Amino acid sequence: MASILILTQYYPPETGAPQNRLSSLAKHLKQQGMNVTVLTAMPNYPKMEVYPEYKGRWYVKDELDGITVHRSWIYVKKSKKIMARLMNYFSFVLSAMIVGLFRVKKHDIIICESPPLFLGKTALVLKWLKGSKLVFNVSDLWPESAEKLGIINNKQLLKISTWLEEYLYKKSAMVSGQTQGIVSNIKERFPTKKMFWLRNGVDLAQFNAERVTYDWRAKHNFKPTDFIGVYGGVLGHAQNLEVILEAANITKEHKDIFYVIAGDGPEREMLHKMKDDLQLDNVLFLGNQPSTEMPNIVSASNAAIVPLKNIELFKGAIPSKIFEYLIFQKPLLLGVDGEARQLFIDEGKCGLFFTPENAQELAKNVVKLHTDRNMSKELGENGESYVRAKFNRSKIAEEFKTALDSIL
């Protein structure tokens, strides 16, 4: 039985896209017959506060879903400054290296999640000293993304980061990418490198109608005829959630159109203030929700709003919540151009596209779906069929296991 170590800064009980994706991958690889272990940080995301039961501890060994999880110390501070961010990354790089060397046994394969890119240093040390194969899993191209988002501007640091990125690709037995754009980017630079498209998807067993436990719409006093557009995820800068509030302001006169925003993050206070300033009675903020609650919220909605900022970098992005919305037959209001648009609008016919950051187009599409419920139903049904055929996490993990077997 092959043994796998998943090395990642983000893992449940935290909530978020990488946490959900990697914990699902761990469970599915275990079901495929692999011995899976996780090495991660003390949970702290997205509030940037270590969870109370882990606070002040250097090392904790947990078990989650039958999988052993080793957790090591991480420096956490509520600050957007680059130095605090780097200290956050490098503290885990160091602590994970120590725990990996002295508390975690040798594994056949190390799957290292990036970003943060610097965690690749820990993966390299463990690979060399324990004789493991390295699979470097890229969910976001660093340092390219960090530079374009203004997270890192220091030329020397960018130069060092680029060298590390390329060195990690060279030393990996295989590189996996979350999107086709990421895979193509790396393949162009390293044409002989073994690549795998480890696409995101949905757990059909965990996110389905059977998980709906009550009538969320009735509990929150929405009428059966009301139209509810929902966003669930991080309230961050990259998501440009202002576009939802601007669209809500445009559609104010429609007294049966509402917007629900579920999640937490650094832009929470700004968004709440914007709602108050615009006097929006048609917007409901829910805060961070447990994964068990999202099926109730999504099931009660009429459409899913998926926005990102209008920058070239995000043309290769595929927000993870897309799959969960579509499995519930909810049409997308997609404000993400590029690969996501090609897959879910052009190919899958799963919803309507609006230009990123364009509130007028979003508002127009909201009204269109509200008015034409037959079109809305057809788009939703298309979405479910498309996700079941192409983005079933169980099937993806099976394909990934075959690729992992090939490098052993």
Image (tube, grey):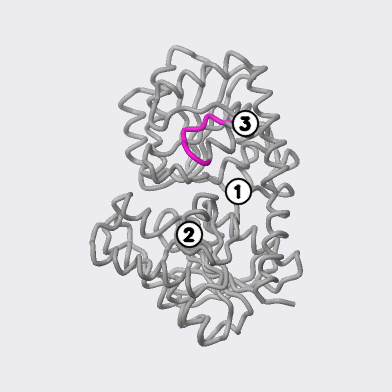
Residue 334 at x, y = what percent? 51, 32
Which range of residues does the magenta coloring cover? 332-339
Vertical relation: 190 (above or below) 68: above
Amino acid type of the residue tagged 1 in the rendering: Ser
Crowding around mark 3 (Cα neighbors within 10 Å: few <14, some 14 to 19, many 20+) is many
What numbered label is drawn on residue 115? none
Please name the residue that numbered disc 2 is placed on. Answer: 186
Image quarter of the C terminus = bottom right
Q: Looking at this view, is 251 or 296 the one in front? A: 251
Amino acid type of the residue tagged 3 in the rendering: Cys
Q: Are marks 3 and 1 in contact (CB under 8 Å)?
A: no
What is the secondary structure assignment of the residue under circle 2?
helix
Residue 367 at x, y = what percent? 52, 16
Amino acid type of the residue tagged 2 in the rendering: Ile
- Taking 302 as reference, is 273 left or right? left
Crowding around mark 1 (Cα neighbors within 10 Å: few <14, some 14 to 19, many 20+) is few
Q: Looking at this view, is 224 or 178 the one in front? A: 178
Looking at the rendering, which quadrant does residue 299 occupy?
A: top right
Vertical relation: 47 (above or below) 257: below
Mark whose residue sits in front, 2 or 3: 2
What is the secondary structure assignment of the residue under circle 1?
loop
Give the residue displayed 75% in from the left and 77% down from the top: 1
Which of the marked residues, 2 or 3, is nearer the chain's N terminus?
2
- Taking 390 as reference, is 287 left or right? left
Residue 107 at x, y = what percent? 62, 80
Report the Cα–Cα distance between label 1 and label 2: 33 Å
Q: Looking at this view, is 219 or 342 the one in front? A: 342
Give the residue displayed 68% in from the left and 62% down from the top: 27
Please name the residue that numbered disc 3 is placed on. Answer: 350
